[in-house]
Image (cartoon, coloured by chain):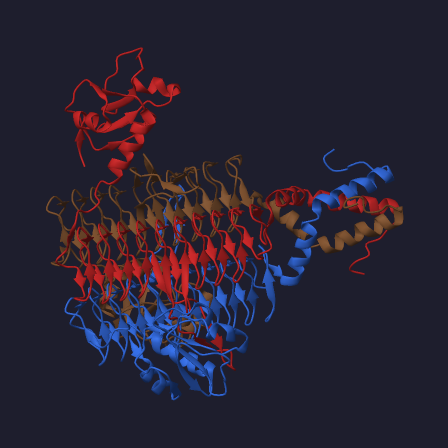
Chain colours: A brown, B red, C blue
Amino acid sequence: MVLNAAQLCELLQGELIGDGGKKVYGPSQIDKGRPGTITFLANPKYEEYAYTTEADVIVVSKDFVPKELLRPAVIKVPDVYGAMMLLIDTFSKNGIPGPGISDTAILHNSIEVADDISIGHYAVIEAGVTVGKRTIIYPQVFVGHGCMIGEDVIIYPGVRLYPNTQVGNRCIIHANAVIGCDGFGYRPNAEGHYQKIGHVGFVLLEEDVEIGANTVIDRGTLNMTRIGKGTKIDNLVQVAHNVTIGEHTVIAAQAGIAGSATVGSFVKIGGQAGIAGHIKVENNIEIQAQSGVHTGKNKEGSRLFGSPAIDYTDYLKSYAVFKQLPEMIKRLEELERKSGSEKTADQ
Amino acid sequence: MVLNAAQLCELLQGELIGDGGKKVYGPSQIDKGRPGTITFLANPKYEEYAYTTEADVIVVSKDFVPKELLRPAVIKVPDVYGAMMLLIDTFSKNGIPGPGISDTAILHNSIEVADDISIGHYAVIEAGVTVGKRTIIYPQVFVGHGCMIGEDVIIYPGVRLYPNTQVGNRCIIHANAVIGCDGFGYRPNAEGHYQKIGHVGFVLLEEDVEIGANTVIDRGTLNMTRIGKGTKIDNLVQVAHNVTIGEHTVIAAQAGIAGSATVGSFVKIGGQAGIAGHIKVENNIEIQAQSGVHTGKNKEGSRLFGSPAIDYTDYLKSYAVFKQLPEMIKRLEELERKSGSEKTADQ
Amino acid sequence: MVLNAAQLCELLQGELIGDGGKKVYGPSQIDKGRPGTITFLANPKYEEYAYTTEADVIVVSKDFVPKELLRPAVIKVPDVYGAMMLLIDTFSKNGIPGPGISDTAILHNSIEVADDISIGHYAVIEAGVTVGKRTIIYPQVFVGHGCMIGEDVIIYPGVRLYPNTQVGNRCIIHANAVIGCDGFGYRPNAEGHYQKIGHVGFVLLEEDVEIGANTVIDRGTLNMTRIGKGTKIDNLVQVAHNVTIGEHTVIAAQAGIAGSATVGSFVKIGGQAGIAGHIKVENNIEIQAQSGVHTGKNKEGSRLFGSPAIDYTDYLKSYAVFKQLPEMIKRLEELERKSGSEKTADQ
């Protein structure tokens, strides 16, 4: 997407000073402005960069009076932050495909597709799938039979949806994520050889869920693995079979949730954290990165750290003493020497 | 797959009471039965749900005498658990493609393919590959030159097999897994710049191995990375170059095994656990989630926890005291005060 | 690739003894030599294997005098290690596609492609992309609009490049890696519902970077996520938005770097380690596997361990005492008993 300064000015409903023909392909930070970009002077403490930036267009407050000549074209607006958000939003839609179904996409003839959807090259959509209005399926996606995909959904290249996955309206699924594969369930026989347990459940993503790149969500064994509305999951996260996650929860990259765990709403899970199987994490709990939650006995609103995870502040206090342990054992030995005591253990 | 109650009754060799025409598309749990499903009363303590379930068919023991009227069609069988397993297995094969090679699959003319195999749309199979009987290769898979794939193998969409990967009979590889990529091997030159070490080995998956979605297994440098028969690996697991894993071992999601490590048979590795390079993990060892095994000096059958990992029970005992450390240092200070002792370290 | 003993001898500029017609498809270790391979006697302590190996060709030093008859064809060279490296390099290029653009690759007509490039089946290359000389794009890759790909780059099957990704010369990107997806950035509204922050930045891989399979690198919010030249990143690694990584740094599998962190040059990051957002990791720091670096206050050249990470040696010393904690608390109790002291906390 390329817009010139005049078009940008119209979009922002501002006042243009300078060359309206300057071409812009995206926004930039004021201290890192590059040619061909539009930048922003939102915070007065960055004013010095306004005079040196290489950006071709700059957005300033309508009240801003420059001390020196500004090289870029200038757009004056009442609300610089608002203008910045609008521009980022505009340019972030750059490259999003328009409606249309590629000749090379393979759609089973039983598929119901709404108007205005986009299906990219080499996508494969199996029997019995439904796809809602304005949904975008990028190239090279696989949608297994019986999947139900809502409206205004975006599915990036290489995503794999196993059969019967349900994707709510306005969900976003990033590249190479896998949704609905079999859970890790086996039954050892008498010799300890693992016999696979078939999985016939499915995954339900409610509305407004976002799934990161290369994340994996297993289907339920018999019923569903459910991700509640508004929940956001980062890249490379593992969600095992039969897990239930509430609403408006955030899960950072590389975290893992073991089978049949229940996670509440408004929970925050840090990167690389782990949650054990079959436990419950209450609403509003905050789990520090790399922690391992092994028990469901934590109260709503608590903050956890460590593996096994305990109260965040308690962990930090204990860890502060942990760092002094080599000195502490010397102090203990000194006391023992004074009291004539001997080591009692190991004897 | 849709079966009606009469067909299901025949499959289970049971006795049907009620409407044989009711349509079923899958099984459900008795406490979560949905219309269009078949459910099971296996455990008498769930009897109450039998009278309220929305499932359309219910399987009960031939000796079961209902206290109230059952709304669903009823199938009486001698062994409810056995019937349940048979039905899950039947429905879990739902959507698995039948034999046939898609017109859009690209197969090098040197490929030997057995009868009854299935190769999906936009799969790419390079020169010198062999594919055994009844194997299913889903759409969008890449099989590099010289790969040998056994019989009754299932390879899900988006899997990438680098050249010379060997896949044993009855293996299952889930979506977007990558098998056989180069190991992480470099030689720093005099300035500390890393020079890539070429990898000419391969990966061998023995029989009955299952590999989770988005898992990565590196090829050997010169020889092979080997996964023993019956071993099951979950999603997002890393297996580095030259690793050898024994038979009937299970590795949970997001665990990682560093280069040239050897893992025995019947080992259980928890989620997010790590195993250091070049060490040996003996048979029957159980490694707790998030643990880091740094040494090969652990005995067969031991159970490990912590990073670096120690005996499981010892770790828990130490961790119990860890939680008391802030109090413990106060008690030490109190003793020092009483004995007239001063801090000796840090002085 | 198949070469016979005579061809190999010519390649190594050695002296052949025995059957020049023996066919070789790859190298092998001397203690694991298989038929159809070439092996090496580089270290005299492995001499015994020279007499029993099943390899068909063996490379030995020109000064080597065998004590028994050697079954394989023999190639004598001045430098066995050098010969070994040359052969591994030769065979590791096995199966790499030659130049040419597949009929099934979809290229927007605005793409500039240099001579001698290779683009595989079912690759999709969007508008405005440039591809440098001798670059290889394997099948099923997706390259978003505006990406700039340098010379001598290798992009393996299933890689997804989001729009505007810049890939320097000689970079290697392994299968199913995702580069340039949106960062994990949201703004909670008054009810705590997360509103997505658009991402308009991009990812820059400088020259000679290698990216592992299934690794994910998020684009910058406004500017770039940058990976410095010569840096090597293993499989399943997460690099969040706005991160800057220096030159010649190595990052092992499953490590994660949170948003806006800065990592220096010549840093070594162990497997499953985590680096918190917005901090700086100085040059030459070495981070032990599974560690969690929470602060930027570590000096150049330091070595870190633990979560939160502290000095490596200090961590090990503290951990050594940690293991003795159950005994230590008994010793403390014994002292308290002797001094007539009582537990003062918890009362």
| Residue B310 at x, y percent in the picture | 61, 50
Which one is nearer the viewer's eye here, B297 or C317?
A: B297
- Residue at left 36%, top 67%? C203
Based on the displayed image, in which of its 4 quarters is residue C218 positioned? bottom left
Q: Is residue B94 visible?
A: yes
Side of B133 relative to B176 (left or right): left
**Residue sitting at the far top:** B67
Which one is nearer the viewer's eye here, A103 or B315?
A: B315
| Residue B211 at x, y percent in the picture | 36, 51
| Residue C208 at x, y percent in the picture | 39, 76
Quarter the C terminus of chain C occupies: top right
- Residue at left 19%, top 54%? B120
Which one is nearer the viewer's eye here, A280 or B29?
A: B29
- Residue at left 24%, top 49%? A153
Looking at the image, is C121 positioned above or below residue B319? below
Based on the displayed image, in which of its 4 quarters is residue B5 positioned? top left
Q: Is residue B211 visible?
A: no
| Residue C334 at x, y percent in the picture | 81, 40
Looking at the image, is A265 positioned above or below residue B250? above
Based on the displayed image, in which of its 4 quarters is residue C98 positioned? bottom left
Side of A289 relative to A314 (left or right): left
Side of A28 relative to A138 (left or right): right
